[in-house]
Structures are given as structure tokens and as C-alpha cells.
Amino acid sequence: MEIVKSLLKRLAILAVVVCGCVTVVSAQFMQGRANGLEKDIERHVKFITADSLLGRLAGSSGELKVANYIYDQLEAAGVTMLTPRDGEDFYMAGTSEEGFPFRDTIHSRNIIGLVPGYDSQLRKEYVVIGAHIDHLGVNRISVNGQEQLQIYSGADDNASGVATLIELAKEIAANRFLFRRSVIFAFFGAEELGMAGSWYFLNRSFSDVSDIAMMINLDMIGRSDGENRFQIFTGVSNLELNTIVNNLKMRQASIQPVLSGTDYFPSDHRMFYEKGIPIALFTTGVHRDYHTPRDTYSKLDYTQMEQIAEFAFALANSVANRDKRLSVGITSHEGATDEDTYYTQKDVDKPAQFLHGDEVQFLKKWVYPYIKYPDSAIRAGEVGRVYAEFIIEKDGRVTNVVITRGVSNELDDEVVKVISASPKWKAAKLRGQNVRVKTSVAVDFKLSKNGEFGIKK
């Protein structure tokens, strides 16, 4: 978009240049904010999830009001806004054959802000931190002949990410002289409609895509119960990026994210990853309230969201201050061995297959027919969903089975045993060569008779 080009040229002239050697300093997160960010993040979430906004469906007046709110918050904090207050309004229509990741006509808007870096050379490169604004809107149902609205307020998905990014933008704006590269804050519309907002930003709006050093995506970061640990997904096993994350975890009082090898749900980071840009998805994962009217603001952990904001600040600061750009993944990392390299099923040209099917076929034809519900687990009333990750080798063997979210030792062990005994898969292919892939499945244990899927007693 022309507005981006003109504003960046003006910023190159107006921004203050810090002369001399700059020593890497510790992040000055929340300096001068004795009361922390929790209450501010909660206040933002309550506004974004208000019933009056009717679930902020893409293109709706509710989405527009949130866009206006974000703009006002960032402008007041000194962030240079690259879009109008109503956002960069866009309409798109196309087919998958034309390269569009969605169908039908889509109307939505993006809100984009910028904090310029202090380095006269590196400021021309960008760390993008994003979160999507939109959600599912409303569902109209009839109860006793009366029409009622079910409002999908989307507190975790993704008011949690938007609210946290607002406060993160304020912190980076207040500490702009700690960032050599520039930081872009991207609030995307129409994520729920095929990530259309981020696609538009990368393919129609922003002219300097090749200068994006990294994208951090905040999506569903509000939960903290036993099944919802803070996770960071970095795409292909990215040794450089993963090392940075692990080093940040060693800081005193730092939240401890889990480096995940699985991309649990589609979101805007995928559009950047397809462009060869290093990514990090920050999430606390899916839960039973996901995409239901039960996803409300009272269920979020605002203390943890503040901690996640601090970790995002530290990661953005580390990447912004590197002398060299991050590599995209392990394949470009010197010294990486073949045994270290794996991809996800979405990274390859032909995903690994089980009996001509995907992971659902694997559950249907192998896991559920052969898994047993331990008698002691039945007597103890143990139920739930076990999440397992595993690698499919170049020859189709299943290895490295790991439980990422378990229920009990007995149920977890049964899942590991059955998956480890899997017959060979048809190996994944990338550029005509067999490659290793990591994938995951979720195995349900229920104490009732099931249909096609599930454990039978």
C-alpha cells in the first residue's frame, strides 16, 4: 500500500538515530508500571467481547469498533499508524485455482502500526507481531418459538491475543531505543475466513515482504488449566530460533513455554511461513470452549497473559537486535544432521499416508481397533483425551512417540504402545525425496459405547 511506502520514507528522515556502539540491554518491560498489565489486558478483553459487538464477524460493525479501539490505543501510545482509524478496508473474491486461500467474497480490515528501529541499516527490516481481530459472530436459534442469539464472544479466540498485543505495542513504543530493527504490529481481519487479512497484507498491501525478519503470532493465549500450557510453535525444527527461546526460558522468573512440534490450528503465521519467513506461534492451545459461546472473558488467566506479553517482548527484542537474519529452518542451519531434520505434514509436497489416508484413517483403522481400555482405568473412571506426537521416518516406520497431553499413566502408556506398534506408513515426500515428518493424534477414552470412533469396552 502506498501509505506504507510514504510513511516509512518519512520515518527514515524523522526517526532519531542513536550513535555509537549500543550494548545489548535487558528488556525494560513494564518499567514504571507498578501495577502491571493484567488489569489493562482484562479491560481490553471486556471491550472486545462485549455482547453489543455481536461476536465481531469479519466485515461487521463489531469488527470495525474493535479496529477503532485498537487504533486509538496504539496512537495514544506513540505508535506510528500505517492505516486509517477504520483500518485498511479490503474486499476480496477468488478461487483456490487463482491462489486465494478462501472462497466467496470477503470483506474485512487490517490495523497496522509501526515502531521504527534505531539502527540506520537494520531499521529497514521488520519483526511483525500479529493477532487476529475477528471471530464467528452470532448464531440465531429458536427456543420455544422465540428467536434467541448465541453470541460467540471469542475471549480466548482471539481477544486474548489482541488485548495482549495492544499492551505489548505500548511497551515496545516506550522502549523503542532497545530495538535495532523496526517492529510492526499487525491486527488482522478475516482470520476465521481462511487467514484472508494476513494473506492480503503479504500479497496486496505491504511492499517490503522480503524485509520481514520474523513473524510472532499471538492466537489463543488466555487459558492455563492442565491441558493448556503455554506453547511456541516455530514450524520446521528451527535450531536458531529454538535456541533463542530456550535461552529466554533460563531468565529469572520467566514463564516456561513448551516448544511444540505441532501446529494445532490454522492461523495467520501460516501465511508468513509460506513466504519463507521464520515464525513463532504463541498459544495455550485449543479447549472445549473453542468456537463455542462458552469462550468468555471470565475464563482467561490475565496474570499468565502478562507473562506471555513479557516473553514476546523479549523474543522480539532478541530477533530485532541480531546482526544476521534468522534462517527459516533447520535445512539452512550449518551442522544440522539428517537425524535432526523433520517437517510437519503441512510443510511437505506429499504428506505421509496410512492405508491411503491421513491421521483420521490411522485412528480409524489402527489405533481404535487395537487399543484397549485398561480394566483398572475403567474401575477408576478415568476418561479424557490423550494427545500424542510421533515421527514417521523416511522408510515409513513410526518412532519417537511422545505424549504431549495425557490423562493417566495407564491410558498414556496404552496409547504409546499401540502407536509404536503401527505398521509402516507411506513416507512423506518433499521435492521428490522421502523425508521425516512429525505429526500428532488425539485419542479419546470414553466410558460409553461409541460410534465409528472411540474406545469400545
Image (tube, rainbow, N blue to C red):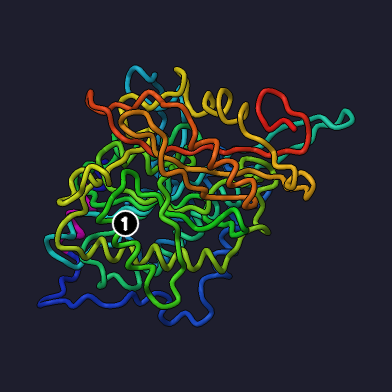
Q: Quadrant of residue 96?
A: top left
Left or right: 407, with 177 as reference point: right
Decide: is 79 above or below 2: below
Q: Nearer the viewer, residue 159 or 257?
A: 257
Left or right: 282, with 298 as reference point: left
Residue 44 horizontal/vertical position (percent): 56, 60
Q: The residue under label 1 is which amino acid type?
A: Asn
Q: Nearer the viewer, residue 311 or 450?
A: 450
Is residue 53 visible in the rendered structure shown here? Answer: no
Residue at x 20%, y 66% (from the top left corner)? 15
Q: Nearer the viewer, residue 393 or 147?
A: 393
Decide: is 435 above or below 261: above
Decide: is 127 above or below 379: below
Q: Which residues are magenta?
A: 5-13
Residue picked out by circle 1:
242
Residue at x 18%, y 71% (from the top left corner)? 16
Query: Label 1: few (<14), some or many (≥20) within 10 Å?
Result: some
